[in-house]
Each structure stands twice: as C-alpha cells, then as structure tokens.
Image: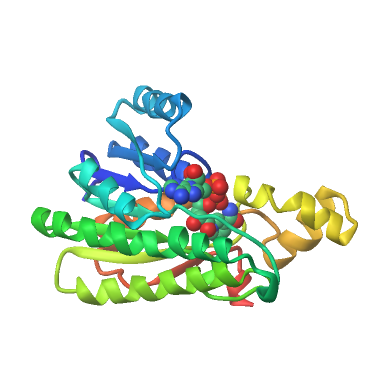
Amino acid sequence: MSVEGKTVVVTGSNSGIGLGVARAFAGAGAKVVLNSFTDRDEDHDLAADLAKEFGTEVRYIQADMSKGDDARALIEKAGVCDILVNNAGIQHVAPIDEFPVDKWNAIIAINMSSAFHTTAAALPMMRKAGWGRVINVASAHGLRASPFKSAYVTAKHGIVGMTKTVALETAKEAITCNAICPGYVLTPLVEAQIPDTAKEYDMSEDEVIEKVILAKQPSKEFVTVEQLGDMALFLASDAAAQLTGQAIAMDGGWTAA
Ligand code: NAD
C-alpha cells in the first residue's frame, strides 16, 4: 500500500529528524502536517515551500508537546491522522542529583507523554479509517543508558514500552506501532551539546565528534535524516504490515556491541 494521499502528522517537524521524515512522506505523495511549539512566519513558509517542492498538501499546526491538551488538539486540528510520527524531543545533560526539576518534567512531557496524548487522540481516527501507523522516534538511549542523560534515557525507555503496549492493543487491527531508535544524527539537538563537551574534555569540536560522539557508533558515521525518513516510509508501507511492537535500532551498530 502506498502512502500517497494518506495524512501523516509529524510532531516536532520544523527541524532535524522530524523535518527529514516529513520530507520523505511529502516526496511519497502523502499529505503532511508539520508541527512545533513555535508559530513564526518561517514555520508557515516551510510548509508552503514543501507543498511547492513536492506538489502535495502541507500544513503547519502550532502545538506545544509539553502540554497534553495541545498534543491532543494537534490531532483534532489535523482532522485526519493515518500515520502518526511522534518525534518531538529535547535533551538536557546533568548528573541526576543536580538535574533541574523543570528540565526533567519538560523532557518527560515532550519526549514521552506527548506520544500518549497524540496516540490516544489518533487511534479512533485510524480505527474509523480501518488502517493506521504509529511510529515513535525513540533513540538508542531507549535501549541503552548513558550517564548524565537520566530524563532522556527514562523517557526513551518509556516510549519503547508504550510502543509495545500500543502494538498489543491494536494487534488485531490493520494498525501497527513501532519505534525507531536512532544512534547519533547531526541535528541541532546534537550540535547544541558539542561546545560544552569540547570545553569539558578540553578538545576541539571536531575531536568531540570523532572521539566522544562517533566513538559510540561502530560505523563511525552519523545516521542521516534521509535514512530515518526512508525507515519511517518502510514502516508505513504494506511490506511492514506484520511488523509491530518493535524497537528498531538504526545506530551504526551501537546497541549491537
Ligand atoms: P531537533 O532539535 O532538530 O528537533 C527537535 C524538534 O522537536 C524540533 O522540530 C523542535 O521544534 C521540536 N520541539 C521541541 N520542543 C517541542 C515542543 N514543546 N512542542 C513541539 N515540538 C517541540 O532534534 P532532532 O535530533 O531532530 O530530534 C528529533 C527526535 O529524534 C527527538 O525525539 C530526539 O530525542 C530523537 N533522537 C535524536 C537523535 C540525534 O542524534 N539527533 C538520536 C536519537 C533520537
């Protein structure tokens, strides 16, 4: 089954992986709903530019994924949601005994609980349509821990658990739910961590990329947003109809080690 004409809602999609996934679906002829918490002219221009580039419908809907009501309202405003990609996410790095409570709450809300709200709002629409796909962008940190990323690791392990549960609850329907667990992708989320890490280790930023970040990835290469977009398209395809409840690592071998 092709995704042409289907509606895909991608949370946190004005940047990075979410934008890469949105571009992949627009390229395959899906109708796309872009989202972030901002409501700037450039967000709306981005939607207009993608619509022009791919000749498909692209809308931008502002909704703050740190708020449950906003997350549910995003799906209601979209009106149709055949494919839901829960991607919005933030990061904060600190030892657990110094971890700011507001950062902890924001990471749990945006990276994990928003997917509860959007999924709860989207499943009735998928059931009505008799078909649906939920694709959660988790992380290699949903399968492995790293020090100083307690909230992120907790949220990502949580969303992997939610993925399996939703898969079981929808197993007898033409609905699947899977998680993609990327290793490192060079997006603003990762770029933001490089200067502080360089200071901490007294290294150049290039050395941080080589000796700290890519040290975890046996491939020694970043995963790309295009590769993740293609994986999301595959999960939405008919070939993946029996693939459900899985946490698929795309991490250059990180979690195989
Ligand atoms: P990014 O910073 O480029 O993108 C994050 C997106 O989330 C942006 O569109 C941002 O606007 C949006 N966002 C942030 N707060 C939001 C909020 N309150 N409401 C709505 N949208 C919000 O980073 P990215 O690397 O593309 O991250 C996307 C997802 O991929 C995240 O869930 C992240 O945890 C996950 N991930 C990233 C990597 C990586 O190496 N970059 C690896 C594994 C998983």
Query: As drawn, which residue projects farthest toward the right?
Result: 202
Q: Is residue 20 above or below residue 144?
A: above
Query: Quadrant location of residue 115?
Result: bottom left
What residue is rendered at 24% in x and 62% in y? 120
Q: Nearer the viewer, residue 216 or 112?
A: 112
Q: Is there any visible trace of residue 187 in the rendered image? A: no
What residue is rendered at 27% in x and 71% in y? 166
Q: Residue 19: where, in percent of width, then height?
A: 46, 41
Q: Is there any visible trace of residue 128 in the rendered image? A: yes
Colour style of the rendered protein structure: rainbow
Query: As drawn, which residue projects farthest toward the front?
Result: 101
Q: How many marks?
A: 0
Q: Nearer the viewer, residue 68 or 198?
A: 68
Q: Residue 142: where, in percent of width, then height?
A: 51, 71
Q: Residue 153: where, in percent of width, then height?
A: 56, 71
| Quarter containing the C terminus | bottom right
Query: Quadrant location of residue 240?
Result: bottom left
What residue is rendered at 21% in x and 75% in y? 169
Q: Residue 9: where, in percent of width, then height?
A: 31, 46
**70 left or right of 5 in image:** right
**21 left or right of 216 in image:** left
Q: Is residue 36 above or below residue 222?
A: above
